[in-house]
Image (cartoon, coloured by chain):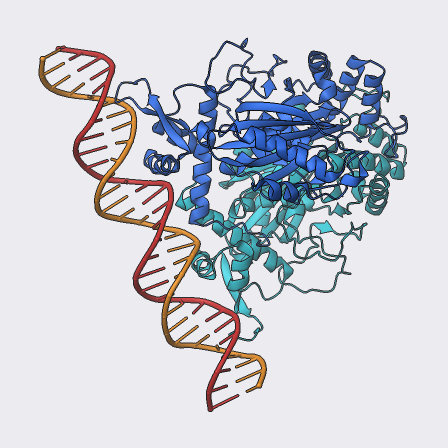
Chain colours: A cyan, B blue, C orange, D red
Amino acid sequence: MHPSASGANLPALRSHNAAVLLDLLRAATLAGGPGLGRPELAERAGLTPQAVSKITARLRAEGLVEEAGRLPSTGGKPGTGLRLAAGSRYAVGVHLDGETVTAVLTDLAGRTVAQRSAPLALDRPVADGLAAITAQVREIAALASGPVLGVGVGMRGPLDHRTGTLHRVTGFPHWEGVPLRDALAARLGLPVAVDKNTNAAALAVLAAPPPAPAVPTGPDGSPAAPVAPAVAVADGPRGPGAGRAADAVAAGESFAYLHLGAGLGAALVLDGVLHRGGRTGAGEFGHQVVQLDGPLCECGNRGCLEALCLAAAARGDTAGAARLLGVGAANLVALLDVDRIVLGGRTVLAAPEVFRRETAGVLAGRGRAVPVSTATPLAVAEGAALLVLAPLFTRAALA
Amino acid sequence: MHPSASGANLPALRSHNAAVLLDLLRAATLAGGPGLGRPELAERAGLTPQAVSKITARLRAEGLVEEAGRLPSTGGKPGTGLRLAAGSRYAVGVHLDGETVTAVLTDLAGRTVAQRSAPLALDRPVADGLAAITAQVREIAALASGPVLGVGVGMRGPLDHRTGTLHRVTGFPHWEGVPLRDALAARLGLPVAVDKNTNAAALAVLAAPPPAPAVPTGPDGSPAAPVAPAVAVADGPRGPGAGRAADAVAAGESFAYLHLGAGLGAALVLDGVLHRGGRTGAGEFGHQVVQLDGPLCECGNRGCLEALCLAAAARGDTAGAARLLGVGAANLVALLDVDRIVLGGRTVLAAPEVFRRETAGVLAGRGRAVPVSTATPLAVAEGAALLVLAPLFTRAALA
DNA sequence: GCCACTTTCGCAACAGTGTTGCCAAAGTGC
DNA sequence: GCACTTTGGCAACACTGTTGCGAAAGTGGC
C-alpha cells in the first residue's frame, strides 16, 4: 500500500517476535524431542526470558503453542518444554504437474498428514479442471481435525504469484489468462496462493529439518508424520571445518533448487528468503548459455543449458545430463555462494542418485564442493501448503 | 552474538525507524530540493505524522537532521522541509587499486567533498604501505568540518569483510594475512571497514540517486558536491511501461555490478541489500563456464568468461569483450531478474560507451532488455566510504 | 478586510511492547 | 536437611508509536 512502507510499529514488532518464536518452535517440533524451554527460546531469539514467557502465553491462548512436558533438569528447577500445537491448524497443498493433480494435507508444522492424486484433463473446459481441483481439495481438507487455513498451488511457470493468473500453459491455450487463484478461492471459500513449482519446492526444502549429518533414518516414531520428509539428505562432500554443524539451524541459509522436468528451472533461497526477482521472473536457469557456438535452442539462442541437458536425457545419457546440470550449478554456486544444491523434478527423480553423484562431482571438480541432495516427489505439493503457513512464521513472502 | 538473534525489542524498533527516515531524508537531500515535510515522510515510511515528528525531533537533537526551509503550501499551513545535516558527519573512503591509493572524503549524505590519489609501493614492506595509506587518510580527513565517523577500504578480493584480513594479494606475497582493518584502525584511532572493490562499488551505485530518465545533466548547482555522482546514467533500452518511473525510489531495488579490470568480478544487490553469500564469496562471476570446450583458463577449467573476455580485450577487440560480458550479464539477468546492470572497472571505463552499448545489445537480443549504465572511476572509493555510513541508514550490512 | 477552510505540527493522555526487580516453586548435590 | 541453581510468573517500569485535541499559518471565497 505505502510506497516503501518500511516503518515498523508496535503491532509489527509483536507479530515479528511471535513469528520468530514460532519458527524456533516449529524446528523443535519437527525434531520430535520434548520441545524447547523458555530460557533456550530466549537465548536463541535474542529476547529476555520474561518476554518469551509473555509471547508464548499469548500464543498458547491462541492455540498455536502447547506445553509438551518437562525438560531434564540442569541443576535447578526443570523447564517446561514448548512446541507447536501441530494439530491446531492445517493447510492444503496442491501440485499441478502435467495431467496429474496431487494434494497433500499438512499440519501446522508443515508435516504431511494425508495425500491423494488424481488425473486432470487439461484438454477439457476450464470449468471442468477447476471442478476437479476443487474436489480434490475438498476431499483432503475433510480429513483435517482442525481449521484449514488455506490452499497453496504449485505449478509450472510462467505465472505471477501476486495475481495468481496463468500465462502460456504449454499445449492448452484455453487456460491462458485463467485467474486460478481467485477462481479457486471463490469455489472453496478459502484463501488461495499460487506460485511456480520451483518456488514451492524450495519452500519445502527451506522448511524441512536442517541437513543433518546423514543419520541412517532411525525409526523415530513421531506422531502424525506417516510420510517421508520433503528432502532426502545425501552424504555429499562436506566442506572444510565439518566440526560445527548443528548450530546453524535456519538462520540465513542459502541454497538453490534446480528442477529438471519438462523444462529446466531454478528457485533461489538467499539468506533464508525466497528471491523472486523484480518482475517475479527469477529462476530462469535453463536458458543460460554455456556453449557459445552450441546448438540452436527454441528460445532463439545457442547453447542453452536446458536444450543441452534435455537432449542428453532424451538420448538416455542420464549421467551426461547430470554433468551438464553440474556445470550450471557450478556457475550458480560461484556467483551466489549458496550453501548447498537441491535437485528435483521428474527427470531427476527418475535416477536421483545418478544426478546427485554426477552433479556433486562436477562441483567438486570446479572447486565448489557444496552438498548436493535430491528432493522428494511430494516437495512441490508440500511447499505449496507452506505458501499458506508461511505468513505465520518468519516474514519472507510479502511483496 | 546470539545464534540466530532475530528477535526485536524497543531499541531495535527505534533505530530501525530512525534509519528508515534517514534513508528517505538522504535521498531528498541528494535531490537537492527544499527537503521533505513530515507528512510526506510519514506517508512514505508508513508511520503516523506524529511518530515522524517525535523521531525527527530526536534526530535533530543529535544533529543528524536539520530544517531546510518552508515548503510551498498546498492549501493550508506550509510544511517545514527536513533534510540531512550533511555537514555534521563525514566518512573517508579508500580505494586500493594496483599501485594507487585513492581517498575521498564524503559528507553524511555520501557526497564526495574532496579526493586525492597517491602511488602505493606494494613491493615495499607492509609497514611502509600501511604508513602511506594512513597518511592519505589523515590528510583528507583533516579537510572535514565535522567529526569523521570512520574509514572504509575497497580493494580486490578475495578477502573476508568480517575480519578485514587480506588473502592472496596477487604478486605481493608479503601482504598475505595482513590484518588490514585492525592495523589501520590502530594507527588511525578510527573504525575501519574493509570490503571487496566490487561490493564497495555496488554500495555506491545503490546509494546514488535513482536512475532518472536521462536528463542531459543540467547545471544543478547543489552545495558541497563539486565531484560528479557515482553513476553516469545512460539512456539504455527501457522496458515496457516507461510511464511510471520516479516512485520506485530505492525500495527493494535489484541490480548487478560487473567489474572488469585485472579480473572479472561481480557484486549483487538483491531487493536493496548486498548479497555477500554464505562464505562471503558471492560474486565470482568471471569463472562461469560459457563455452564447454573453450580454451583452458588458469583456474583449471575450460571456457571461463573471464579468460575469454580478457583475451578479447588484450587483442584490442573491445566490442568483442563487451559482447562476451553481455552473454554473462544475460545469464545473470535471467537467473536473478535484476532491474539493471552497472558496469565498472578499469577496462570498462577505458571505453564505457562501447561496453554499455554492446552489453545492452546482447541483453536485448536475449530478450532481457534491462538498462545498462557505467560507474564512475570514483565509485569504489565512494562506496568504501559508504561502508562506514551504512549503519546509520537502512540495516543491510550486518552478519 | 474578513471569515471559513485546510494543513501542519506539537502537547498530553493512552495502549501496548519488552525489561527489570522480585519471589515462590522445584529440582540437584553436598 | 540445607545451600544452591534454575524456572517462570507477578508487578512496576521505561519507552515505543497512536490517538485526541488545539494552536499556528497559510489559501481562497465573499
Compare residues B246 and B373 and report the one nearer the observer.
Answer: B373
User: Which residue is found at the position 54% from the left and 31% from the top?
Assistant: B141
Q: Is residue A221 left or right of residue A83?
A: right
- Depicted A244 relative to depicted A125: above or below: below
Q: Is residue B196 left or right of residue B41?
A: right
The quarter of the displayed image where residue A385 is located: top right
User: Which residue is found at the position 56% from the left and 74% from the top?
Assistant: A73
Q: Is residue B220 left or right of residue C3?
A: right
Task: Please indicate, yes or no, whether residue A354 appears anywhere in the rendered image.
Answer: yes
- Depicted B118 relative to depicted B2: above or below: above
Residue B151, how many percent across, how many down?
58, 35
Compare residues A205 and A168 and report the one nearer the observer.
Answer: A205
- Depicted B310 relative to depicted A219: above or below: above
Residue A22, how many percent across, how many down?
53, 53
Compare residues B251 and A173 and report the one nearer the observer.
Answer: B251
Residue B90, how many percent across, how many down?
50, 31
Residue A23, how many percent across, how many down?
56, 52
